[in-house]
Amino acid sequence: GGLPPAHNPLRSWTMFSAHFPSGVVEPDELGDACVGEAFRAEFCARVSSCLVVVGGESGGGVWRIAVPTQHATNYRMEVYLGEPLSECDSSSLDGITGQVLPWWAPPVAERAVPSRSGLARHAAFTRFRVLFVNAVSLWWGQSAEVDPVTSWTELMGAALDAAAASPAANPTRHGLHASASC
């Protein structure tokens, strides 16, 4: 309860703005800004930044933005258009010429800007999933032929199901002799 609805394009911005009264997210000792119960159920902000974008005369454009990630998990990216702040990165990102190199958003541990999401003129969000964060985890995942899961809860459920169906937990199901129970 108390969370903005999932379809709200600024759901996370709203939640973090309410949690950090100054309007600026504050990074923790691990470099992210998180709300919730530590290491159990947390929502974390990896980036809180802004930049000046250039669009077409009638609006629109395509901007390439990169965000550093540390973990293979589910992400939600929220963006809004508003008046530029003095804290914004002043190097503009041209959405018309088709820049090849992305603008790298700094993590909150390096720089965070105040939220002005309440004054947003246009907003959107997207969800995406990172399965592997480096070459080693990609190699391991492909070598072990692991199936990706959508959450740690799903992973733990699959582990418990596998354990319950194992010969050690249910020997007669696998045609093995079962010892008398204690």
Image (spheres, helix red, strand yellow):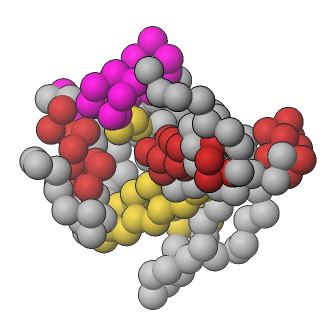
Residue at the spot 84% in from the left edge and 41% down from the top edge: 140
Magenta stretch: dominant SS? loop
Considering every residue shown, the one lying at the far left of the view is 2
In the rendered structure, which segment of residues is drawn in magenta?
A: 22-42
Residue at the spot 19% in from the left edge and 62% down from the top edge: 5
Q: Nearer the viewer, residue 164 or 83?
A: 164
Q: Position of residue 78 (x, y in %)?
A: 40, 57
Q: Nearer the viewer, residue 134 or 166?
A: 166
Q: Is residue 60 above or below residue 164?
A: below
Residue at the spot 28% in from the left edge and 30% down from the top edge: 35
User: Can you see residue 52?
Assistant: no
Q: Is residue 166 above or below residue 95?
A: above
Q: Is residue 178 above or below residue 95?
A: above
Q: Position of residue 129 (x, y in %)?
A: 58, 56
Q: Position of residue 36 (x, y in %)?
A: 26, 30
Q: Nearer the viewer, residue 10 or 135?
A: 135
Q: Is residue 45 magenta?
A: no
User: Can you see residue 78?
Assistant: yes
